[in-house]
Amino acid sequence: MLIKRLSSQAGFAAGLALLLFFVLFPFMQMLSTSLKPADELFTVPPLWVPKHVSMANFMAAFQHKQFVRYFMNSLAVSAITCALVIIVSVLAAYGFTRLEFPGRKFFLNVILVSQMFCISAIVVPLYKIVGSLGLLNSYAGLILAYMAFTVPVAIWLLRSFLLNIPPDLEESAMMEGASKLAAFFKVVVPLLRPGIGATAAYVFLMTWQEFLFALIFMTKPEMRTLPIGIMDFKGQYETNWGTMMAASIAISIPVFVLFLFIQRQLISGLTEGATKG
């Protein structure tokens, strides 16, 4: 029995280690390439750990004339999209969860069915809609396109959290004199903070790394986001792999910071909700 348990634990640990290797290996290879000087990039056999650590690739990436502009473009688009999606999705999820109105199940099914279509299938219709509004090569047009495919998922995520919040809490608040709107903001929203944090992380990640819409909707160089701007390091005849990997590392940093922040917010949101409940 003991041997069987130990072998099972060893198999689980080996599988977990293998999965961890596949997840971390691309990032470690990217980090290694970004820290290599030019003469170590194409050595045979390849160097997994650079002999001479160099920050020249990071300096070259940040000294690129448009890199900071690309970074700010991505940050602005992702942050504004995240804020708008959360506002719209919280209200919509609350309506679908708490209110009874004709066609509620139908609209929920429509939202669910919309997720069956891949993003590339809606590019052309969205391009025509945004173009007819005169919003091509604008942040507003790209944000609207991002909202089109993130709002449905956000509604479903937040609705699942709302279903776990007892309506009795709102009714108790309204019995004490609070309006329905006040009960929503003072009772539901604090308890919904874990769901808002998880949804915000999803929306930010999706918009921060998105490539296809940004490539099609933003044709002016100064309007590009980071995933598109990083292609500046790829030339017609050669690719500056060291600088490209350094730029990719820089792109990853805000995502890591966001998740560290969201992790703390999730814990605090759960404890505050339990205390207030």
Image (cartoon, grey):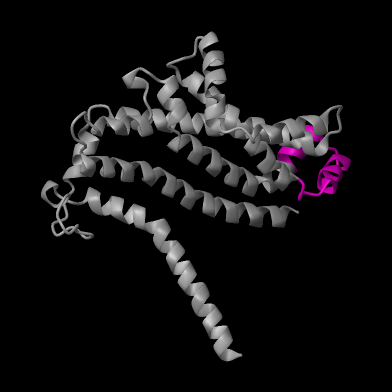
Secondary structure mainly formed by the magenta segment: helix
x, y percent for residue 255: 43, 45
Q: How many discs mark residues in the rendered view?
A: 0
Is residue 47 rendered magenta in the image? no
x, y percent for residue 56: 16, 44
- Direction from residue 58 to residue 112 in the image, left or right: right
Residue at image point 30% right, 50% down: 30
Residue at image point 64% right, 46% down: 195
Residue at image point 63% right, 49% down: 194
- Residue nearer the viewer, 50 or 254: 50
- Direction from residue 196 to residue 258 in the image, left or right: left
Q: Is residue 226 above or below residue 268?
A: above
Looking at this view, name the residue that lies furthest to the right. 175
Q: Is residue 191 above or below residue 23?
A: above
- Direction from residue 46 to residue 182 in the image, left or right: right
Q: Can residue 182 be seen by looking at this rendering?
A: no
Looking at this view, name the residue that lies furthest to the left. 39
Q: Quadrant of the N terminus?
A: bottom right
Residue 221, by quadrant, is top left
Q: Can residue 157 be seen by looking at this rendering?
A: yes
Q: Which residues are magenta?
A: 163-187
Q: Is residue 139 above or below residue 189?
A: above
x, y percent for residue 160: 72, 46
- Residue nearer the viewer, 63 or 230: 230
Residue at image point 23% right, 37% down: 61
x, y percent for residue 138: 45, 17
Residue 231, by quadrant, is top left
Q: Quadrant of the C terminus?
A: bottom right
- Direction from residue 35 to residue 104 in the image, left or right: right
